[in-house]
Amino acid sequence: MRGLLFLLNALLLLESTKGLKYDELNDHDRGIVDRAIERANKDYGNGKHLDFYTIINRLLHIDLVAILYMVNVILRSTSCDSKTPSVHQKDCKLHEKPPQVSCIDCKGIMKPCLLLRQKDEVNHILLYHTKPLQHLSQS
């Protein structure tokens, strides 16, 4: 029971920056988003540019210390055509239609980007990379 209470005290919190514009992101998050835009457009930007939609941060709080562990960047297709280099294009309008891509940065390492419809694979990455933190919080 004590371990369960400790685990509950060390919750993984989700902090969503949905609604923030690219230019409002801090330098750290903007760097991650830039890498995600580049990688997603390389892998999935068939004709249309993929650009920043939102990011989700997973934070682990232990004894008032917050450790940024993982950032999940969500990208959407836009009204703009793909071009090189793939960078944020503020004049492009985001579309609701596919492809929508999830790029996960874990401890500074960008994992392979996946289409959001690949829910099992995205969830596997999210679960696999949170297990070490959950294990640490139980000791």
Image (spheres, rainbow, N blue to C red):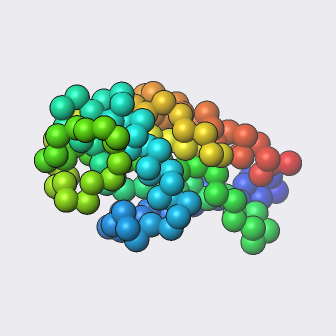
Asked if residue 127 lies left or right of residue 10, the reply is: left
Asked if residue 5 lies left or right of residue 120, the reply is: right
Residue depicted at x 33% and y 66%: 21
Which of the pair 57/20 is nearer the observer? 20
Residue depicted at x 44% and y 51%: 33
Residue 130 lies in what quarter of the image? top right
Asked if residue 20 lies left or right of residue 69, the reply is: left
Is 104 situated above or below 33? above
Expressed as whole percent of the image width and height from the top left, the position of residue 27 reads: 53, 64
Camera sees residue 116: no
Expressed as whole percent of the image width and height from the top left, the position of residue 115 reads: 34, 32
Is 137 situated above or below 17? above
Which of the pair 18/24 is nearer the observer? 24
Expressed as whole percent of the image width and height from the top left, the position of residue 67 reads: 69, 59
Is 58 situated above or below 62? above
Camera sees residue 107: yes
Residue depicted at x 45% and y 66%: 25
